Amino acid sequence: MIVKKLLCPERVRRIPQHFSWIDHRLVREHHIEDCGTEALALYLLLVTVGDSDGISYYSDSKVTKLISISKAALRAARK
């Protein structure tokens, strides 16, 4: 059995009342306007592959391959 340790427990995603697969706040609070295409692709991937605690165990190499970006672009997308 895998023992998980939450890196930032305060950042665990809570399902809001207005739940959809992608959190509505992304649009309603205008966060989407601050994101580039690569950041949005990363967000979609992480939402899709995260477990019930929102944790993904995908390596940087796997992520860059899946969304077709460089490691430098991945670093920028995370910011």
Image (cartoon, rainbow, N blue to C red):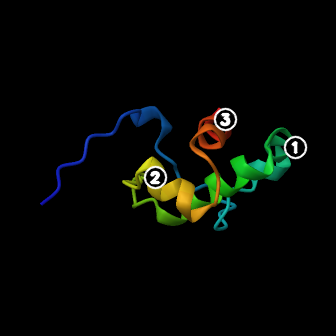
Residue pictured at 72% horizontal, 50% vertical: 38
Residue 10 in the image, given as x and y percentages of width and height = 46, 33
Q: Earlier in the sequence, mark 3 or mark 2?
A: 2
Disc 2: which residue: 61
Labelled disc at residue 76 = 3
49 left or right of 28 in image: left
Q: Which element carries disc 3, helix, strand or loop?
A: helix
Q: Which element carries disc 1, helix, strand or loop?
A: helix
Residue 35 in the image, given as x and y percentages of width and height = 79, 43
Q: Amino acid at mark 1?
A: Glu
Q: Earlier in the sequence, mark 2 or mark 1?
A: 1
How dense is the environment of label 2, judged by Cα within 10 Å: few (below 14), some, or many (20 and up)? few
Q: Are marks 2 and 1 in contact (CB under 8 Å)?
A: no
43 left or right of 32 in image: left
Residue 62 in the image, given as x and y percentages of width and height = 46, 58
- Residue 47 occupies which quadrant of the picture? bottom right
- The answer for how far apart the CA atoms under marks 3 and 2 are is 15 Å
How dense is the environment of label 1, judged by Cα within 10 Å: few (below 14), some, or many (20 and up)? few
